[in-house]
Structure formats: C-alpha cells, structure tokens
C-alpha cells in the first residue's frame, strides 16, 4: 500500500489526522442520530440501535453503519426523510440571495495538501462515482 500524506488547514488553523478522524467519527454519529430522529430504523449487525447504542459504536462501526444506512436509501427516500430540513435550507439560501447589497458575507477556507496519489485517482477513490454514498 502506498504512503499517503494529508495536510489540512481550515480558516488558517491546522488539523492533525487524528483530529480529522474524530471529526469524521462525530459526523457519522450525527448522521445516524439525525436519520433515527427523522424516523429511519438504524441497524448494525442485524439489530436495531437506540440512540444510546449509536453512541457506543466504535469509529469503524459508526462508519460502516452510516454508509450502509445511506446506501439503503435512494435519493427520493432521502429527500422525503429530510423534507423539512431541505425546505428550511432552501429558505435560508433564498434569504441569503435576497440580502441587501453590501451585506456581510460569511466565508470559510479549507486548504488540503494530499501527497502520494494523483488527483484523478484521489477523486475516483473519494467519490467512487457516487459522492452521496461516500464517507
């Protein structure tokens, strides 16, 4: 296996790989809790999970469960599950676009440096042609 290196800076702050791993773990837990709150039946190893069970998943189990749950829903079912959040998001963007000229904009910057892999190969690996179902 080749040696990959990743450097990440967000808004000028450097993030170590361990911190990014924790962010990914927290994100997987968040997605599972959110899907459950919206009515999805969250399962791991063939058994339904409570919110407490989700909190006890290891990082790898959370990742596998999150990916499996998202892959079990097609785009239409995801839209239906998240319909209220999507409606609120649409309104937020409409309001932002209707802001008066000169209103302050919020911005964020992320700089990533990945070495040890070609950009096309990295993109193919990261998206697998279907970014929606990737971690």
Image: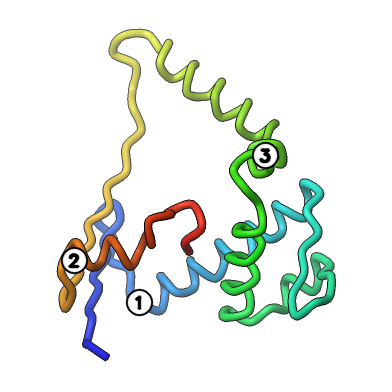
Q: Marks 1/3: CA distance?
A: 31 Å
State the image coordinates of residue 53 (x, y, percent, origin top left).
79, 74
Dot in front, 3 or 2: 3
Name the residue: 49% across, 73% down: 22
Name the residue: 45% across, 74% down: 21
Name the residue: 68% across, 43% down: 77
Q: Is residue 37 left or right of residue 94?
A: right
The residue labelled by disc 1 is 17
What crowding class fits label 2: few (fewer than 14 Cα within 10 Å), some (14-19), or many (20 or more)? few
Q: In this view, does 12 lie above or below 4?
A: above
Please tell me which residue lies in front, 69 or 6: 69
Q: Is residue 75 left or right of residue 135?
A: right
State the image coordinates of residue 84 (x, y, percent, origin top left).
70, 31
Q: For the residue labelled by badge 2, is the local secondary structure a helix, a strand or a loop? A: strand
Q: Marks 1/2: CA distance?
A: 12 Å
Q: In which quarter of the image is residue 15?
A: bottom left
Give the mark, 1 or 3, whose residue is nearer the N terminus: 1
The residue labelled by disc 2 is 113
Please tell me which residue lies in front, 53 or 83: 83
Give the mark, 1 or 2, whose residue is nearer the N terminus: 1
State the image coordinates of residue 8 (x, y, percent, origin top left).
27, 65
What crowding class fits label 1: few (fewer than 14 Cα within 10 Å), some (14-19), or many (20 or more)? few
The residue labelled by disc 3 is 82
Give the mark, 3 or 2, whose residue is nearer the N terminus: 3
Q: For the residue labelled by badge 3, is the local secondary structure a helix, a strand or a loop? A: loop
């Amino acid at each position: 296996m080749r040696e990959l290196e990743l450097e990440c800076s967000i808004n000028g702050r450097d993030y170590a790989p361990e911190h990014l791993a924790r962010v990914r773990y927290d994100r997987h837990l968040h997605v599972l809790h959110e899907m459950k709150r919206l009515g999805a039946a969250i399962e791991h190893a063939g058994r339904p999970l409570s919110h407490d069970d989700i909190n006890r998943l290891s990082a790898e189990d959370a990742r596998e469960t999150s990916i499996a749950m998202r892959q079990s829903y097609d785009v239409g079912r995801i839209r239906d599950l998240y319909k209220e959040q999507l409606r609120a998001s649409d309104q937020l963007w409409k309001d932002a676009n209707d802001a008066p000229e000169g209103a302050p904009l919020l911005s964020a910057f992320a700089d990533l440096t990945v070495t040890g892999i070609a950009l096309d190969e990295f993109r193919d690996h990261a998206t697998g042609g279907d970014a929606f179902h990737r971690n």
